[in-house]
Amino acid sequence: MKYPCLVQKRFCKTPIDVTVYGEGVTEDGAPETVLEGSFMCNWQDGAETILTAEQKRVAISGRALFPGDICPDLPVISSGKVNVFGVERAILYGRKSRNPDGTVNFTELKIE
């Protein structure tokens, strides 16, 4: 059975550069790079004001949605960085939303 893609390519209009790190490290102690590439994504961003005792802090966050599996070599995307709109941001977590048959319907990256 073919499942409908919930993040369609025609709605992915934002260019984004993605670097995904694996769990290991290189000989230099740097994170092991598993994926580097340029993609088109559906980008949703926002801001949140966090009030502290001394001051307020504004946290910028976003979500990048991709049709299918952008990193099939990794079962889970746990860290990395993206460059979107000329700003480099860290990946907080990645999610691969799966169909009932186990195939990946879309990939989501939560960005800080």
Image: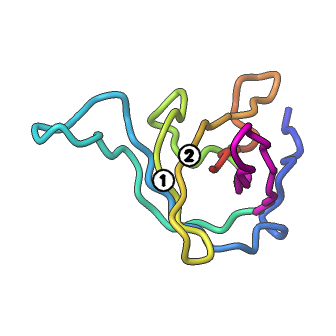
Q: Quadrant of the N terminus?
A: top right
Quadrant of residue 16 within the rendered picture: bottom right
Residue 81 is tagged as: 1
- Tell me which residue sits at (81%, 58%) in the image: 46
- Tell me which residue sits at (70%, 73%) in the image: 14
Q: Is residue 5 above or below residue 103?
A: below
Question: Does residue 51 show up magenta in the picture?
Answer: yes
Colour style of the rendered protein structure: rainbow
Amino acid type indicated by mark 2 = Ile
**In the rendered image, which residue does mark 2 sit on?**
91
**Residue 25 location in percent, x, y?**
23, 33
The magenta segment: 43-67
> Badge 2: few (under 14), some or many (20 or more) residues near its Cα, within 10 Å?
many
> Badge 1: few (under 14), some or many (20 or more) residues near its Cα, within 10 Å?
some
Identity of the residue furthest to the front in this view: 54
What SS does tag 2 mark? Answer: strand
In the image, taking residue 39 as reference, residue 100 lies left or right, namely right
- Tell me which residue sits at (37%, 35%) in the image: 22
Amino acid type indicated by mark 1 = Lys
| Closest to the observer, 89 or 3 | 89
Dots 1, 2 in contact, CB < 8 A: yes
Distance from disc 1 to disc 2, alpha carbons, whole Å, reads 5 Å
Picture mark count: 2
- Tell me which residue sits at (51%, 43%) in the image: 71
| Closest to the observer, 55 or 65 | 55
**Residue 32 location in percent, x, y?**
28, 40
**Residue 84 location in percent, x, y?**
60, 69
Q: Is residue 53 above or below residue 81?
A: above
Query: Is residue 35 something that shows in the picture?
Result: yes
